[in-house]
């Protein structure tokens, strides 16, 4: 994406310039190794390490210690989401989530994709005493929740394999999908049905369904879920939730990118 450039100030602060340059590098490359930062900034490895460590400390980057790579961190992501196309997705989503919550009497949430994780950005909690709580502001492994799985299902096979290069996946409960092969099978089914489900895969006793919000190119930009205690999930209730979530997703898509709004 092209950006306008202004002239450099007469007096630059080299450390700040290097930090901002590294953030731009992360945006372009998606992931960086220490050696790449050292080479491209023309600084010593120790200097590059201190720079990356400070970015990690403030949440602008995070490190995958098993692979030795750095990626964009949650602070940068949250700032970026707030500025995307000058659209406040939370403002558009809030009344839609509240209407969805009221129609099914369960918790409705909005999530955004972030690689192998999904970020919960908005929620309308159920008013029932026993309910699924809000996760707003939390990053959760995408393959562990319906919000994440329905977004992963919009990725191409190549993108999915790059996202999950290893066969084994981390688990949060004994019911979490634990291998890439199992995840692929679930995603194939999600593509056919148009929705994802989760049953005690991120939290014991809680289940959910989710529907993706895709842009004009079919790319999953967000997802809406309905979650509840497992004791209240039946085949009949799930069918109602799916239909309601699909209407909510269609309305949010229309608000963001244009199109008819369902009443």
Image (cartoon, rainbow, N blue to C red):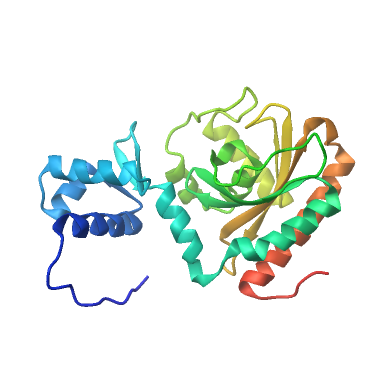
User: In x, y percent, where is residue 108?
Assistant: 73, 49
Residue, far top: 174
Q: Is residue 76 left or right of residue 187?
A: left
- Asked whether 180 or 45 is in front, the reply is 45
Figure label count? 0
* Residue 214 visible from this viewpoint: no
Where residue 258 sits, quadrant-wise, is bottom right
> Which residue occupies 50% across, 62% down?
82
> Which residue occupies 47% across, 47% down?
115
User: In x, y percent, where is residue 245?
Assistant: 76, 54
- Asked whether 83 or 185 is in front, the reply is 83
Q: Is residue 106 left or right of residue 112?
A: right
User: In x, y percent, where is residue 167?
Assistant: 47, 31
Q: Is residue 167 above or below residue 89?
A: above
Q: Is residue 77 left or right of residue 150?
A: left
Q: Is residue 178 above or below residue 185?
A: above
Where residue 207 sits, quadrant-wise, is top right
User: In x, y percent, where is residue 224?
Assistant: 68, 53
Image quadrant where one finds the C terminus: bottom right
Image quadrant where one finds the N terminus: bottom left
Q: In this view, does 19 lie to the left or right of 144?
A: left
> Which residue occupies 55% across, 69% down?
87
- Asked whether 8 or 183 is in front, the reply is 8
């Amino acid at each position: 994406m092209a950006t306008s450039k202004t002239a450099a100030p007469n007096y630059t602060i080299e450390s700040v310039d290097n930090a901002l340059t590294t953030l731009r590098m992360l945006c372009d490359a998606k992931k960086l190794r220490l050696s790449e930062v050292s080479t491209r900034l023309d600084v010593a490895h120790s200097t590059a390490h201190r720079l990356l460590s400070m970015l990690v400390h403030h949440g602008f980057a995070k490190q995958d210690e098993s692979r030795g790579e750095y990626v964009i961190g949650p602070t940068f992501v949250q700032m970026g989401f707030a500025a995307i196309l000058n659209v406040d997705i939370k403002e558009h989503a809030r009344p839609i989530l509240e209407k969805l919550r009221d129609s099914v009497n369960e918790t409705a949430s909005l999530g955004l994709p972030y690689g192998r994780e999904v970020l919960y950005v908005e929620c309308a909690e159920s008013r029932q005493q026993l309910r699924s709580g809000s996760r707003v502001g939390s990053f959760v492994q995408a393959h562990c929740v319906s919000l994440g799985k329905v977004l992963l299902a919009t990725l191409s096979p190549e993108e999915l394999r790059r996202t999950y290069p290893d066969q084994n996946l981390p688990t949060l409960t004994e019911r979490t999908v634990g291998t890439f092969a199992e995840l692929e099978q679930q995603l194939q089914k999600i593509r056919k049905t148009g929705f994802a489900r989760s049953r005690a895969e991120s939290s014991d006793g809680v289940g959910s369904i989710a529907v993706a919000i895709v842009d004009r190119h079919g790319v999953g930009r967000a997802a809406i879920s309905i979650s509840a205690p497992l004791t209240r999930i039946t085949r009949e209730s799930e069918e109602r939730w799916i239909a309601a979530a699909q209407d909510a997703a269609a309305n949010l898509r229309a608000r963001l990118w244009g199109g008819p709004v369902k009443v």
